[in-house]
Image: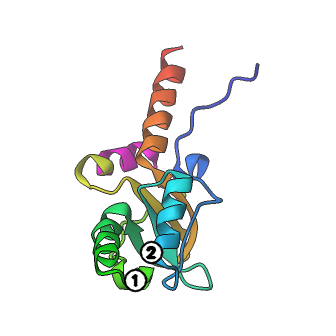
Amino acid sequence: MPNKKAPTTVREIMSRDCYRVTGKTSVSTLAEGLSLHRLPGVPVVDERDHLIGFISEQDVLGKVLESTYLNDEPPLVSELMRQEVLTVTPNKSLTDLAQEMLSNKPKVYPVVEQERLVGIVTRRDVLNAILSMRMKHNH
């Protein structure tokens, strides 16, 4: 079995084929996608895959409840998304990102290169990578 090196950068562990939505996505479609992909939140992109925001289950929950209660159409993602988004680059060190994750709240970070979304990295991805670094280091 080849001696596989433990990952050290975001590029090595990010999900490239990540679920994403646009501002025109309905909140009900988004909720189904979050559930299907088991994600706490997702990047919002324009038609050229430029990151324009982020939307989480928490952002959506109250509005879905409200629209159910009022029996009206759930809103669009663009009405609920946050436009200030913490992002990382593919070359960021995993240990640096892990340090940042200790003080910042997001569980999911969009990975952006030249303003375009190239993937996502989750807190769980980083935790697993740090654990694998320790395993490799101890053997």
Identify the secondary structure beneath mark 2.
helix
Query: Is residue 59 inside the magenta stretch?
Result: no
Quadrant assignment for the N terminus = top right
Is 73 on the left or on the right of 58, as rendered? right
Query: Label 2 sits on what residue type?
Result: Val
Q: CA distance from mark 2 to mark 1?
A: 6 Å
The circle drawn on residue 75 is 1
Disc 2 and disc 1 in contact, CB within 8 angstroms: yes
Q: Residue at x 37, y 77 (%)?
A: 81
Identify the secondary structure beneath mark 1.
loop
The circle drawn on residue 123 is none
Callout 2 crowding tier (Cα within 10 Å): few <14, some 14–19, many ≥20: many
Query: Label 1 sits on what residue type?
Result: Pro
Main SS category, magenta section: helix
Residue 40 vertical placement versus 13 (above, below)? below
Q: Residue at x 30, y 51 (%)?
A: 100
Front-most of residues 58 and 73:
73
Residue 61: x and y, percent?
A: 32, 65
- What residue is disc 2 on? 27
Residue 58 vertical placement versus 132 (above, below)? below
Front-most of residues 14 and 10:
14
Going from N to C along the chain, the mark reached first, 2 or 1, is: 2
Quadrant assignment for the C terminus = top right
Q: Residue furthest left?
A: 103
Residue 103: x and y, percent?
A: 23, 51
Is 13 on the left or on the right of 65, as rendered? right
Q: Residue at x 47, y 72 (%)?
A: 28
Q: Residue at x 27, y 69 (%)?
A: 62
Is 49 on the left or on the right of 127, as rendered? right
Residue 138 vertical placement versus 19 (above, below)? above
| Magenta stretch, residue numbers | 91-100
Residue 125: x and y, percent?
A: 49, 43
